[in-house]
């Protein structure tokens, strides 16, 4: 990034200010100048955000500890999502592993083999985080790999508006300049430019856009991916009478559900609807083929899905930036590499959403969902059935086992396991699962109640 003297960031919402803070902190000891152009349509930002644990990587990148933000930005710990069913026990999908592996054998493989032996188990009893949520308790995860408390991670829920104000103050303190002039267009040639209301182009070496409506006309465009057309039908606020440690998802019928996102004493209830129509530009953002212009965060996709209500695309993009920046050697397009990786992440999210929604509706005793699977999702479903693995997002953004446990908890069927797992004797499998459940139940009374 030291090759760029001027960086222009376009946007006025959480995406833009996160990017400003990130870039300003990373480049604070260089001569790079960062200007944020806020004279655009405001980004629609949800009242509450509940990102995955990789928000901690963002805090590290801007050198701010979560403890320092808890009061100023009203942060609150989160453990995952609860899926609620009529006359059935809920399933708690927490961040991390359920139980512990046997050597190199993942624990989800052990549980699959356990089920093949006609044994039944409540997955909520195989995770101290799940059991704690049901008991109204919480203890921060530990880095001690020998502890049952190392098998999960906590994320941070926050009020977007308050967090945005914190980022504003930090960005300006780091020297980011803010322009309120109305912006009508952005573009790329040798570098990039932002066109102001006086029709004067403001030049930059590198352009970051967080506004879907500002398209670059000079370059061809392509869709990022064909998303599922989810719609947010209604939103209400209420007091948070249940546990604030998890979001809650409840299927209503094969095309409708509600999702409750909680934060301390406040809960926002979102009603979602699946519609089988062409997604169009509302759901698919088109990205320019330009080597020095990056479309960032929610400007790239609209994932209205309760299954991923806790995923903040800003943080996926920031994690990618940590991988691809500072800029590589000459004649290598960092933006193309970034766009390729980000597109793959979004396509994987689409596939896991399709599979999980079908499993969710099936467990709710609803008729078969009309949600169609993409060819990629069909392939992954087949692979899961044959091998007991699901190849989604196998990188540092989302640990593979998180997605496997989601599918298992929602009732996704499988037909096979890894060959080496089938060779483990039945007694060892049963004893290992039993020890995990015993350990969870033993530690549960020692876990403190939620404040």
Image (tube, grey):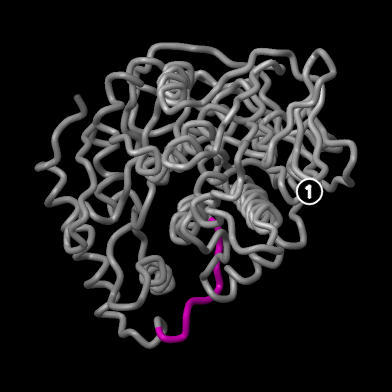
Q: Which residue is mark 1?
A: 290
Name the quadrant of the C terminus.
top left
- Give me the residue at 29% from left, 34% from top: 66
Q: Position of residue 229 (x, y in %)?
A: 75, 36
Predominant secondary structure in magenta? loop
Q: Position of residue 157 (x, y in %)?
A: 39, 29
Residues packed near mark 1 inside 10 Å, few (<14), some (14 to 19) or many (20 plus): many
The image quarter containing residue 366 is top right
User: Which residue is more in the foreground, 107 or 15?
Assistant: 15
- Give me the residue at 20% from left, 51% from top: 142
Q: Is residue 445 above or below residue 97?
A: above
In this view, which residue lies farthest toward the front? 31
Q: Is residue 109 magenta?
A: no
**Horizontally, is 237 left or right of 221 in the view?**
left
**Horizontally, is 364 left or right of 120 in the view?**
right
Q: Is any part of residue 49 visible from this angle?
A: yes
**Horizontally, is 174 left or right of 104 in the view?**
right
Q: Position of residue 3 (x, y in %)?
A: 59, 50
Q: How many marks?
A: 1
Q: Is residue 394 above or below residue 293?
A: below
Q: Secondary structure at mark 1?
A: loop
Q: Position of residue 118 (x, y in %)?
A: 40, 69
Q: Is any part of residue 90 visible from this angle?
A: no
Q: Is residue 179 above or below residue 427?
A: above
- Give me the residue at 35% from left, 21% from top: 73
The magenta stretch spans which residues? 412-420
Q: Is residue 417 magenta?
A: yes
User: Which residue is more in the foreground, 316 or 421?
Assistant: 316
User: Which residue is more in the foreground, 282 or 266?
Assistant: 282
The image quarter containing residue 28 is top left
The image quarter containing residue 364 is top right
């Amino acid at each position: 990034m030291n090759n760029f003297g001027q960086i222009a960031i376009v946007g006025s919402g959480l995406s833009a200010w996160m990017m400003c803070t990130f870039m300003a902190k990373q480049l604070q000891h260089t001569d790079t100048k960062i200007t944020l152009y806020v004279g655009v349509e405001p980004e629609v930002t949800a009242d509450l955000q509940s990102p995955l644990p990789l928000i901690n990587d963002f805090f590290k990148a801007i050198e701010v500890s979560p403890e320092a933000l808890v009061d100023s930005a009203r942060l609150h710990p989160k453990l995952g999502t609860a899926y609620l069913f009529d006359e059935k026990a809920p399933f708690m999908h927490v961040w991390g592993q359920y139980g512990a592996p046997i050597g190199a054998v993942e624990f989800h493989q052990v549980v699959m083999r356990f089920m093949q032996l006609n044994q039944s188990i409540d997955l909520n009893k195989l995770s101290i985080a799940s059991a704690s949520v049901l008991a109204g308790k919480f203890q921060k995860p530990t880095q001690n790999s020998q502890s049952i408390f190392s098998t999960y991670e906590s994320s941070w829920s926050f009020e977007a508006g308050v967090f945005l104000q914190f980022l504003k103050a930090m960005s300006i303190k780091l020297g980011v300049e803010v322009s309120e002039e109305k912006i009508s267009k952005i573009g790329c040639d040798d570098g990039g430019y932002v066109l102001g209301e006086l029709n004067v182009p403001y030049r930059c070496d590198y352009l970051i856009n967080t506004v879907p409506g500002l398209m670059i006309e000079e370059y061809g465009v392509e869709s990022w991916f064909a998303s599922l057309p989810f719609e947010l039908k209604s939103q209400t606020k209420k007091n948070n009478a249940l546990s604030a440690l998890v979001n809650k998802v409840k299927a209503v019928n094969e095309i409708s559900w509600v999702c409750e996102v909680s934060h301390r004493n406040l809960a926002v209830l979102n009603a979602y609807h699946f519609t089988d129509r062409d997604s169009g530009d509302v759901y698919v953002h088109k990205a320019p083929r330009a080597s020095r212009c990056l479309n960032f965060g929610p400007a790239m996709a609209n994932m209205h899905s309760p299954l991923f209500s806790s995923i903040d695309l800003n943080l996926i993009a920031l994690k990618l930036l940590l991988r691809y920046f500072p800029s590589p050697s000459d004649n290598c397009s960092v933006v193309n590499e970034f766009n390729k990786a980000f597109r793959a992440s979004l396509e994987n999210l689409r596939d896991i959403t399709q599979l999980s929604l079908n499993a969710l509706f099936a467990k709710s005793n609803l008729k078969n969902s009309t949600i169609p699977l993409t060819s990629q999702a069909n392939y992954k479903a087949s692979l899961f059935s044959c091998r007991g693995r699901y190849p989604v997002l196998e990188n540092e953004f989302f640990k593979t086992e998180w997605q496997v446990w989601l599918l298992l908890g929602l009732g996704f069927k499988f037909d096979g396991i890894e060959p080496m797992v089938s060779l483990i004797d039945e007694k060892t499998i049963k004893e290992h699962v039993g020890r995990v459940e015993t350990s969870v139940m033993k530690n549960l009374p020692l876990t403190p109640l939620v404040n």
